[in-house]
Image (tube, rainbow, N blue to C red):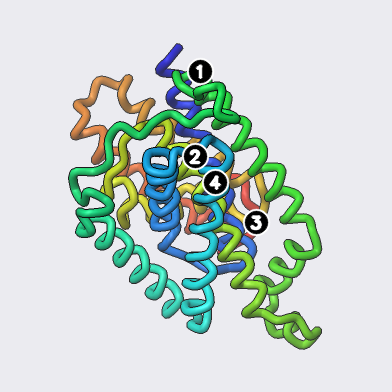
């Protein structure tokens, strides 16, 4: 039972990541390789808020979202002046910078040693969220809340403007809409909500280190979005469940862990190739890249 709940908690964490990334990948048509960086920033801020500041659940979560969104806003203003491949390279550079800072700023982040012993958050300072069942309930509530927020966002005037920009930015520009402002808002929102996953990961695992937020993780997040599909809310949900459950399924086929890890990457690669060839919108998406 605990094993199943653990898998579901990780699915909830990646649902929040993929739903957030879908806003900029599937609606704003921006391929960002920096989502793992924001995920990591949220996790480290959570550790600082819980261990040093002694904040309770909601203040720590809110602080993590606000700081990460602010950083996302600044990076968005800088990087969104670039287009297409240059924007991708800018977010790649940001991802590498954040990973390097987390790895080498030992006095603050403890570098490769990581931060152990992150305390469990307390609800209103009274009820400690400790144990796998309480974390499953917390992660499920936050995942559902994020899904509802982004579903409403996708079908809001802002979401329709992003879709219009994705499909024909020149036409939207001719109607007087500020394209750069729309992209910056989408990038900031996606960055801020990535911190929710960072909060859950840090509080649940109680240990974080830079290797959990490297470039491989960034590619993993984008792969989940593309496999599930973009442009709607169903695709990211399916993609998140797929990429988390697949490696666990490989555990039951009798392969050693090192082979299973390599097979996971091979399978991901094959699935991406097949999808890009025959179903570019993903398993449940409605937008073709």
List the residue tagged with mark 3.
231
Q: Position of residue 119 (x, y in %)?
A: 39, 31
Residue situated in front as seen by the camera: 142 or 264: 142
Residue pictured at 56% horizontal, 43% vertical: 59
Residue 133 bears which disc, if any? 1
Residue designated by label 2: 55
- Number of marks drawn: 4
In the displayed structure, does residue 102 sit left or right of residue 6? left
Q: Residues within 10 Å of mark 3 (few under 14, many from 20)?
A: many
Compare marks 1 and 2 and give the one earlier in the sequence.
Answer: 2
In the image, taking residue 20 as reference, residue 46 lies left or right, namely: left
- Residue 78: give its label: none
Depth order, front residue of 248/76: 76
Q: CA distance from mark 1 to mark 2?
A: 22 Å
In the figure, 7 relative to 194: above or below?
Answer: above
Of residues 249 and 60, the one nearer the viewer is 60
List x then y, in percent, for residue 11.
49, 34
Circles 2 and 4: CB atoms closer than 8 Å? no
Mark 4–mark 3 distance (CA, rounded to whole Å): 10 Å
Tell me, yes or no, whether the two marked residues, 1 and 3, touch with CB atoms within 8 Å: no
259 versus 210 height, above or below: above
Q: Is residue 191 above or below residue 180?
A: above
The kind of secondary structure element at disc 3 is: loop
Q: Which residue is mark 4?
A: 228
Which-is-in-front pick, marks 3 and 2? 2
Q: CA distance from mark 1 to mark 4?
A: 27 Å
């Amino acid at each position: 039972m605990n094993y199943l709940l653990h898998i579901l908690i990780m699915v909830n964490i990646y649902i929040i990541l993929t739903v957030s990334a879908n806003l900029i990948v599937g609606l704003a048509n921006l391929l960002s390789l920096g989502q793992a960086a924001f995920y990591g920033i949220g996790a480290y801020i959570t550790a600082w808020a819980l261990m040093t500041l002694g904040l309770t659940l909601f203040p720590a979560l809110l602080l993590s979202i606000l700081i990460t969104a602010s950083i996302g806003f600044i990076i968005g203003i800088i990087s969104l002046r670039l287009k297409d491949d240059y924007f991708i390279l800018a977010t790649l550079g940001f991802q590498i910078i954040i990973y390097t800072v987390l790895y080498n700023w030992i006095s603050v982040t403890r570098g490769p040693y990581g931060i152990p012993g992150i305390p469990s958050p307390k609800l209103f300072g009274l009820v400690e969220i400790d144990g796998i069942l309480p974390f499953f309930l917390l992660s499920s509530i936050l995942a559902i809340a994020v899904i509802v927020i982004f579903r409403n966002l996708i079908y809001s005037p802002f979401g329709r403007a992003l879709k219009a920009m994705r499909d024909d930015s020149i036409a939207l520009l001719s109607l007087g809409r500020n394209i750069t402002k729309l992209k910056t808002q989408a990038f900031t929102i996606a960055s801020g909500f990535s911190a929710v996953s960072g909060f859950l990961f840090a509080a649940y695992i109680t240990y974080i280190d830079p290797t959990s937020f490297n470039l491989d993780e960034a590619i993993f997040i984008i792969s989940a979005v593309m496999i599930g599909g973009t442009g709607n809310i169903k695709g990211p949900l399916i993609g998140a469940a797929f990429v988390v459950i697949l490696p666990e399924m490989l555990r039951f086929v009798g392969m050693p862990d090192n082979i299973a890890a390599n097979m996971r990457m091979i399978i991901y690669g094959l699935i991406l190739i097949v999808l890009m060839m025959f179903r570019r919108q993903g398993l449940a998406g409605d937008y073709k890249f």
